[in-house]
Amino acid sequence: MNVAILGAGVISKKMAETIRGVDAATAYAVGARTLEKAQGFAEEFGFEKAYGSYAEMLADPAVELVYVATPMSHHYQHIKLCLEAGKHVLCEKSFTVNAAQAKELIALACEKKLLLAEAIWTRYLPSRKMIDDIIASGIIGEVTSLSANLGYNNKFKERIVKKELAGGALLDLGVYLLNFARMVVPDEVTKVVTHAVQTEDGVDMQDFITLHYQGGQVASLHSDTTGYSSGLGSINGTKAYLEVVDVNNPQKLVVYSRARTVVAEYDIPEQITGFEYELQACIDAIAAGQVECEAMPHSEIIYIMEQMDALRAAWGYEIPVM
């Protein structure tokens, strides 16, 4: 399948490396804001075509699947541009700025019978099923609570601190934690307790989120753009607990006994970059005539977007819509 990348930034390079390692994908085209940048990217990663505008790239009839890797503030307009050009789309997280944008684009994709997927890689990684299987085995008993943190010192980056670029910890990092919690405990959330450390413009630099579930479970989540954290996830049960080493890209899964001794360890399969699973899922879904990926269906995209809308509303942070 001919894959094109819309945007030639840092994250695009990771997808470009991925495409080279996936047999079912061809590194076909890249579109950037300048032809010079696109040509440099194409030469570095072996893409056949380079375009100095997104519209020009999307006019190429050979382009089949487009990976959107522009700032989150621009996802809505770029996804729409792709869909209107008749292209299947895999868009980087967070999917859009708000749920209303997501719903509109999903409706358009369904109308045009085009695949539209979110590249939240933790939903597609093999570790997702591994965690599910470990919990289902009963080794940790019934899940009672979970905690997860994710922190990087990104406070100097424009995409983090500028509200017009949909900045903040939630859309950049918290989205992983919310997805982690959702995958572990899919029950209805009955109560949310949250607060954020914000800039003068209202941009959330640190988020603290506690989710209470209908089944009595509790999730405690902390995302931070001002400093580094362990990135650990802990799934606590009535018999033992499961530690996820790096919730952003699990490196190892370890089950500990109630005495905090290691009961079992699970290694994660080797990766090209980790992006290969979401890419292959899109290719397979397109081949099957589907408009969504089973690992991250449209209903889940909307669910997480609505969760994040509600959290920002609680903090009084409104992101400008382009």
Image (cartoon, rainbow, N blue to C red):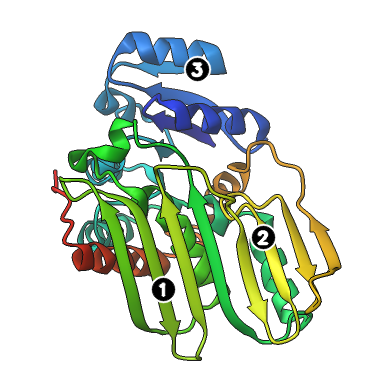
Residue at the spot x=59%, y=32% of the render? 19
The crowd level at tag 2 (other Cα within 10 Å; few <14, some 14-19, many 20+) is many
- Image position of 176 (left or right of 242): left
Percent across and percent down for residue 216 are 50, 90
Q: Nearer the viewer, residue 45 or 241?
A: 241
Provide the secondary structure element on which disc 3 rests: loop
CA–CA distance in space, label 1 to label 3 = 48 Å
314 with respect to 150 (left or right): left
Q: Which of marks 1 and 3 is in front?
A: 1
Q: Mark 2 points at which residue?
A: 244
Residue 252 lies, in percent from the top left, at 74, 54
Q: How many residues crowd around disc 1 within 10 Å: few (fewer than 14), some, or many (20 or more)?
A: some
Mark 3 neighbour density, 10 Å: few (under 14) some (14–19) many (20 or more): some
Check residue 311 in the rendering and tell me which mark sits there, or answer none.
none
Q: Is residue 200 visible in this depiction of the protein? A: yes
Which residue is disc 3 drawn over? Answer: 48
Query: Residue 186, position in %: x, y?
Result: 50, 78
Q: Eyeballing the image, is 177 above or below 66?
A: below
Mark closer to the observer (3, 2): 2
Q: Earlier in the sequence, mark 3 or mark 2?
A: 3
User: Left or right: 177 with respect to 22?
Assistant: left
Label 2 sits on a secondary structure element that is strand
The numbered mark, 2 or 1, whose residue comes first in the sequence reads 1
Which amino acid lies under the numbered mark 2 shown in the image of this protein?
A: Val
Taking 180 as reference, is 107 left or right?
left
Image quarter in which the N terminus is found = top right
Q: Which residue in the structure is indicated by mark 1?
A: 210
> If you read the primary sequence from the N terminus, does the residue marked by circle 1 or circle 3 appear first?
3
Cα separation between marks 3 and 2: 39 Å
Task: Give the tally of numbered discs.
Answer: 3
